[in-house]
Amino acid sequence: MTKRALSWGVLGASNFALKTMAPAIHAAKRARLAAIATRDTEKAAPFAALAPDLRIHETYEALLADPEIDAVYVPLPNALHVEWTERAARAGKAVLCEKPIGLTVRMWNG
């Protein structure tokens, strides 16, 4: 039985995502770097060099709406972690979020 690769999307083109997480996702068995969300196509270019079939979305919402994306990596600024982790989960995606998940307990509890 062959299992389908888990298709990952990355919200934003952070340096850590480029240097560490994207290569790790790309190298992992049964995982593939499938999409990135960034308005800056120049920042997407090194990711596309790693994964030539990479789809580039201009908004985070567009990546979350992509039916081919199974999981999302969130390397955004800390203040955006809760919002985009929740949005990704509501979109039915598995989520790997950078730390911290939130800046305060209140932020997480709403």
Image: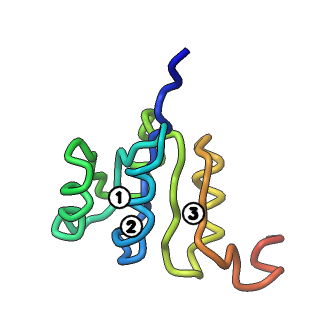
* The quarter of the displayed image where residue 19 is located: bottom left
Residue 10, given in percent of the width and then of the height, sits at 42, 58
Residue 40, given in percent of the width and then of the height, sits at 22, 68
Q: Describe residue 22's horizontal placement relative to residue 46 as left or right.
A: right
Residue that sits furthest to the bottom in the current view: 104
Residue occupying the point 45% across, 47% down: 8
Residue 36, given in percent of the width and then of the height, sits at 34, 56
Q: Describe residue 78's horizontal placement relative to residue 48 as left or right.
A: right
> Label 1, on which residue?
37
Instruction: Give amino acid for label 3.
Output: Trp
> Label 2, on which residue?
12
Residue occupying the point 66% across, 58% down: 86
Instruction: Give amino acid for label 2.
Output: Gly
The answer to whether the residue labelled 3 contacts the one labelled 2, judged by CB atoms less than 8 Å apart, is no
The answer to whether the residue labelled 2 contacts the one labelled 1, judged by CB atoms less than 8 Å apart, is yes
Mark 2 crowd level (few <14, some 14–19, many ≥20, 10 Å Cα): many
Q: In the figure, 50 relative to 71: above or below?
A: below
Q: Earlier in the sequence, mark 3 or mark 1?
A: 1
Q: Earlier in the sequence, mark 3 or mark 2?
A: 2
Q: CA distance from mark 3 to mark 2?
A: 11 Å
Mark 1 crowd level (few <14, some 14–19, many ≥20, 10 Å Cα): many
Determine which of the numbered discs, if any, sits on residue 48 in the image. Answer: none
Residue occupying the point 48% across, 27% down: 4
Instruction: Give amino acid for label 1.
Output: Ala
Q: Earlier in the sequence, mark 2 or mark 1?
A: 2
* Image quarter of the C terminus: bottom right
Choose between 26 and 104: the one closer to the eye.
26
> Label 3, on which residue?
84
Q: What is the secondary structure assignment of the residue under circle 3?
A: helix
Q: What is the secondary structure assignment of the residue under circle 2?
A: loop
